[in-house]
Amino acid sequence: MVRKAKGKKSTKGKGPGKKGGNPPKETRFKKGTSGNPKGRPKGSKNLRTLILEAARDHVTATVGGKTRKISKIQATTMQLATKAAGGDHAAMSKFLDWIDDIETQAAAARPTQFPLSEIDVEVLRAAYERMKQCEPKQPEG
């Protein structure tokens, strides 16, 4: 183990020829000035927003012999389903993957029918039976 000799000062710290500390005042960012003045302008949209806006745009399509205005995402989904139904294996795979994802998300969002375990149900039934015994009897008549 290396020990410092007593009485010697550390070579770290500020002073002439030393590194560390704050940059000179004239090179620091001025108060109220951004560190990246040519960065993304305020109000500009990110890629996710642009894609979602493009997907929601409407196009004119012929569906069942009638001309209708539908969103691009609806038109794309209908084309994918049509290709899958026509036997395109890549379209079938993609379409079925989407359906599986949607059903999985829906099942996760839906609460289970009986979220209590069997033991919990037994405890609740026993408590209910005890509470029924405490009820006052109705007068006959």
Image (tube, helix red, strand yellow):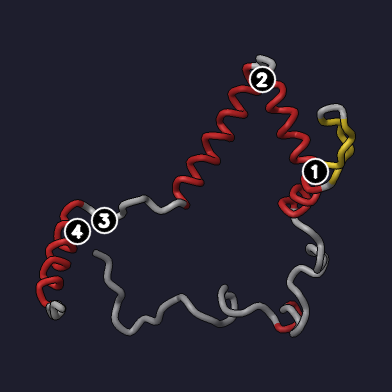
Q: Quadrant of residue 102?
A: top right
Q: Nearer the viewer, mark 3 or mark 1?
A: 3
Query: Which class describes the residues within 10 Å of circle 4: few (<14), some (14-19), or many (20+)?
Result: few
Between marks 3 and 1, how big is the CA–CA gap? 43 Å
For numbered disc 4, what is the local secondary structure? Answer: helix
Q: Residue at label 2?
A: 85
The three-letter code of the residue at mark 1 reads Ser
Quarter where residue 124 is shown: bottom left
Q: Which residue is denoted by mark 1 in the rendering?
A: 71
Q: Are marks 2 and 3 in contact (CB under 8 Å)?
A: no
Q: CA distance from mark 1 to mark 4?
A: 49 Å
Judged by depth in the image, the label closer to the viewer, 1 or 4, is 4
Q: Is residue 15 above or below residue 123?
A: below
Q: Amino acid at mark 3?
A: Leu
Q: CA distance from mark 2 to mark 3?
A: 42 Å
Residue type at tag 2:
Ala
Look at the numbered discs 1 and 4 and tell me whether their residues touch, using CB distance below 8 Å.
no
Question: Of label 3 and label 1, which has the lower sequence position?
Answer: 1
Q: Compared with residue 20, is residue 83 higher up or lower down, i.e. above or below? A: above
How much space separates mark 4 and mark 3, taking CA atoms?
6 Å
**Dot 3 and dot 1 residues touching (CB under 8 Å):** no
Give the percent coordinates (x, y) of residue 48.
71, 51
Q: Using the image, tell me which numbered label, if any, was put on residue 120.
A: 4
Label 3 sits on residue: 116
Whether the residues at callouts 4 and 3 have beta carbons within 8 Å, the answer is yes
Horizontal side of 97 relative to 28 (left or right) equals: left
Rendered location of residue 77, percent (x, y) = 71, 34
Query: What residue is drawn where x is 82% and y is 42%?
Result: 70
The percent coordinates of residue 6 (x first, y second) are 29, 81
Three-letter code for the amino acid on which mark 4 is drawn: Asp
